[in-house]
Amino acid sequence: MVLNITELKEAIETVIMKRLDHKNLDKDVEYFADTPSTTENLAVYIWDNIRLQLKKPELLYEVKIHETPKNIISYRGPYPLNGIYNPINKRIAHDSCTNISSDSD
């Protein structure tokens, strides 16, 4: 399947540029009021919220954040639990961060 690049750009504009750019994440973004604003949690936030903007959210494969040239975070979302996707805000401990990888030196 193919994702319309215009739709993806609009989702990025809405989720990242309007909500996160030039913001104090801990004070200005409600999600981070109770969640530490780590790069890993930021990747989860972006994943969940971009999926909400897309007509076919299943086409989103990965969110990758290049924090520094040597520190890169990749997140591929929660795997289905017994074949059922665990929706946003209903994560369970054993599937919430199992798909995060970090490459650093």
Image (cartoon, rainbow, N blue to C red):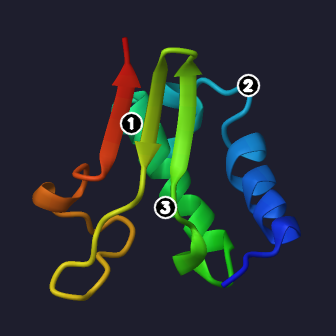
Label 3 element class: helix
The residue to which callout 1 is attached is: 40
Look at the image and tell me in which quarter the N terminus lies: bottom right
- Quarter assignment of residue 101: top left
> Mark 1 or mark 3, which is nearer the start of the sequence?
1
Residue farthest to the bottom, as pictured: 83
Q: Is residue 97 above or below residue 88?
A: above
Disc 2/disc 1 C-alpha distance (Å): 19 Å
**In front of the other: label 2 or label 3?**
3
Residue 16 placed where, x, y %?
A: 69, 45
On screen, residue 80 versus residue 18, left or right, reads: left
The residue to which callout 3 is attached is: 48
* Residue 98 visible at all: yes
Label 3 close to label 1 by CB (< 8 Å): no
Q: Check disc 1: other Cα within 10 Å, few if <14, some if 14-19, many if 20+.
A: some
Residue 105 got which mark?
Answer: none
The residue to which callout 2 is attached is: 22
> Mark 1 or mark 2, which is nearer the start of the sequence?
2
Q: Is residue 58 above or below residue 83?
A: above
